[in-house]
Image (spheres, coloured by chain):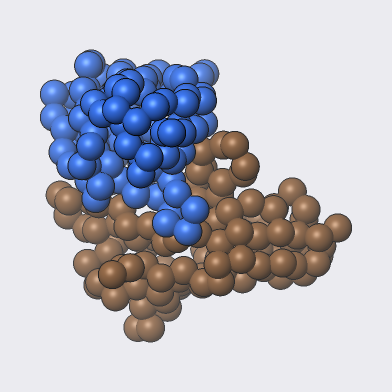
Chain colours: A brown, B blue
Amino acid sequence: QQQVKQSPQSLIVQKGGISIINCAYENTAFDYFPWYQQFPGKGPALLIAIRPDVSEKKEGRFTISFNKSAKQFSLHIMDSQPGDSATYFCAARYAGNNRKLIWGLGTSLAVNP
Amino acid sequence: NAGVTQTPKFQVLKTGQSMTLQCAQDMNHNSMYWYRQDPGMGLRLIYYSASEGTTDKGEVPNGYNVSRLNKREFSLRLESAAPSQTSVYFCASSEIPQTTNEKLFFGSGTQLSVL
């Protein structure tokens, strides 16, 4: 059973458009929600992250929106560029000593020029 | 600063062969991880080492063994490779300080094919 459900599986956006990737979770014991970006042939790299006591976090063109009551969080990429074409993974980390990271299945984003 | 270095980058094995994937980090991180990545399956944790001298199973440990050789190095061994172990393997490390957000640093991966 997938504890972190990510959608869509793939996404095509025109240059300059807004890319939106959604994740939903069920377990309320998560305390940290990162997004990782992965380019072909490379390992994932941390893009942006949020804690559940914050509803929104913005870093440049990348924004995480967090809805604690709905147990959902999303990544918005404003003014999407061809260089943003990559696979994006959301994740959620258990609080406490466990600190296990649960991953979504990933979204392949293609930004057309 | 090299970060996390994995070797080899590519490997082809025959069923039943053994091999060891090497990983080293130069960031003085306490924790290290081995993941496998398969199409449509995302990232799945094989084994992790929270600190030097400790190792624990992740989601998919069957068919694998690990060794935390020292604080820098964490190796993954396939004793008898099977086609189901064809995958891209990633090593990662993190500091996990208690008061700040965790950041995983990944290597560039090892693409393994088992025929």
The residue sitting at 43% across, 46% down in the picture is B37
Percent x, y for residue B94?
34, 35
Is A58 or A40 nearer to us in this picture?
A: A40
Percent x, y for residue B88?
46, 38
The N terminus of chain A sits in image quarter: bottom left
The residue sitting at the bottom extreme is: A70
Left or right of residue A97: residue A94: right
Determine which quarter of the picture holds residue B29: top left
The residue sitting at 34% across, 31% down in the picture is B15
The C terminus of chain A sits in image quarter: bottom right
Vertical placement of residue A9 versus A99, above or below: below
Is B88 or A97 nearer to us in this picture?
A: B88
Left or right of residue A33: residue B76: left
Asked whether residue B67 is in view, the answer is: yes
Is B57 or A17 nearer to us in this picture?
A: B57
The residue sitting at 62% across, 42% down in the picture is A40
Asked whether residue B107 is in view, the answer is: no
The residue sitting at 50% across, 43% down in the picture is A44
Left or right of residue A78: residue B79: left
Vertical placement of residue B74 versus A110, above or below: above
Left or right of residue B4: residue A53: left
Percent x, y for residue A27?
25, 72
Determine which quarter of the picture holds residue A75: bottom right
Is B56 or B112 nearer to us in this picture?
A: B112
Percent x, y for residue B104?
40, 40
